[in-house]
Amino acid sequence: LRVLVLHGPNLNLLGTREPSLYGMADLAAINQALRRLATQEGIGLECRQSNVEGELVTWIQEARGRFDGIVINPAAYTHTSVAIRDAIAAVQVPTVEVHLSNIHQREEFRRHSYIAGVAVGQIAGFGPGSYLLGLRGLLDHLNGLNG
Ligand code: DQA
């Protein structure tokens, strides 16, 4: 299996960005933890980050036929992007939405996700662990273990 991990805008600043909300781990550390899990599970993994909505849309489009699943932290685009939602719906590549923080516990505008309606599921609030839980959940989904 091959999984694409997508990080949205401002996640390149992790480690220095509002550490009380998003923790001390930087993106390289998160990707390293993901790669460790991928190796353990015997799957292929590619991690990408973009601050540009259209670039994320293009990568999702290109995932069809190349990746079996996507783990995405759409960051602020979670709450604004019909385009990312439509791309996920169009390619039909199983996608898990993850967030470092518990978006349901924060400002009202973070509670709504355009992505959740087209995702296999959403994991939020576990810091970098959200990505690892998301990847495990995606693999179980792909292996038919989620019922
Ligand atoms: C985030 C939550 C979003 O509301 C925010 O815009 C982010 C990060 C998270 O991982 O907790 O950039 O997706």
Image (cartoon, rainbow, N blue to C red):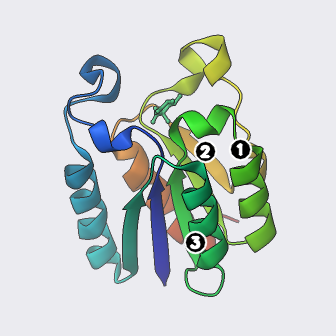
Question: Residue placed at 61% from the left, 56% from the top?
Answer: 54
State which quadrant residue 28 falls in.
Answer: bottom left
Per the rendering, the mark at residue 122 is: 2
Report helix, strand or loop for mark 2: strand
The quarter of the image holding the C terminus is bottom right
State which quadrant residue 26 falls in.
Answer: top left
Q: Amino acid at mark 2?
A: Gln
**Is ligand 1 within 8 Å of the beta carbon of the residue shown at mark 2?**
no
Name the spot of residue 143 as percent of width and height, x first.
58, 78
Q: Amino acid at mark 1?
A: Ala
Label 1–label 2 contact, CB within 8 A: yes
Image check: 80 left or right of 125? Answer: right
Question: Circle 3: is it few (<14), some (14-19), or many (20+) Cα within 10 Å?
Answer: many
Upstream in the sequence, badge 3 or badge 1? Answer: 3
Q: Which residue carries the number 3 mark?
A: 69
Whole-number angstrom distance, CA of label 3 to CA of label 1: 15 Å
Per the rendering, the mark at residue 116 is: 1
Q: Amino acid at mark 3?
A: Gly
Name the spot of residue 63 as percent of width and height, x first.
59, 76
Whole-number angstrom distance, CA of label 1 to CA of label 2: 6 Å
